[in-house]
């Protein structure tokens, strides 16, 4: 899994991020970097909120 270092440096996760901020960050992360899967807890929360969960490899 290749990391997009440039994206990661420019888009840090906020300190003490809210759930909404974490979801937003991970959606952007899935579009720009393929270094790891989104945490399962966030995927579950996104499904509850009817937010499309990005599929790895289909950015």
Image (cartoon, rainbow, N blue to C red):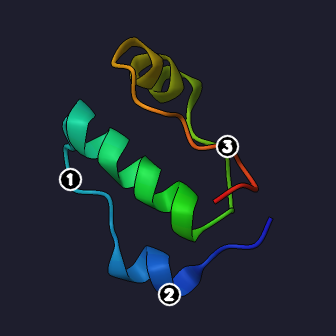
The residue that disc 2 covers is 6
Check the image and report above or below for 37 versus 8: above
> Which of the 4 image quadrants contains residue 55?
top right
Q: Quadrant of the C terminus?
A: bottom right
Image location (x, y in percent) of residue 13:
32, 58
First in residue order: circle 1 vs circle 3: 1
Which residue is painted at 57% across and 40% down in the image?
Answer: 38
Q: Quadrant of residue 4?
A: bottom right
Could you tell me how far apart the alpha carbons at marks 1 and 3 are, in whole angstroms?
Answer: 26 Å
| Closer to the eye: label 1 or 3 | 3
SS state under label 1 = loop
* Residue 29 position within the rendered picture, expressed as x and y whole percent measured from the top left: 49, 60
Mark 2 or mark 3: whose residue is earlier in sequence = 2
Q: CA distance from mark 2 to mark 1?
A: 19 Å
**Residue at image coords 31%, 48%:** 24
* Nearer to me, 43 or 17: 43
* Mark 3 lies on residue: 55
Q: Quadrant of the N terminus?
A: bottom right
Mark 3 residue crowding within 10 angstroms, few (<14) / some (14–19) / many (20+): few
Q: Nearer the viewer, mark 2 or mark 1?
A: 2
In this rendering, position of residue 55 left or right of residue 27: right
Furthest toward the right, the residue is 1
Q: Which residue is mark 1?
A: 15
Residue that appears at 19% across and 36% down: 18
Above or below, 8 relative to 57: below
């Amino acid at each position: 899994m290749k990391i997009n270092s440039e994206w990661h440096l420019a888009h840090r996760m906020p300190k003490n991020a809210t759930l909404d901020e974490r979801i937003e960050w991970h959606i952007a992360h899935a579009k720009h970097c393929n270094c790891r899967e989104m945490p399962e807890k966030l995927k579950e929360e996104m499904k509850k909120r009817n937010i499309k969960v990005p599929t790895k490899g289909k950015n």
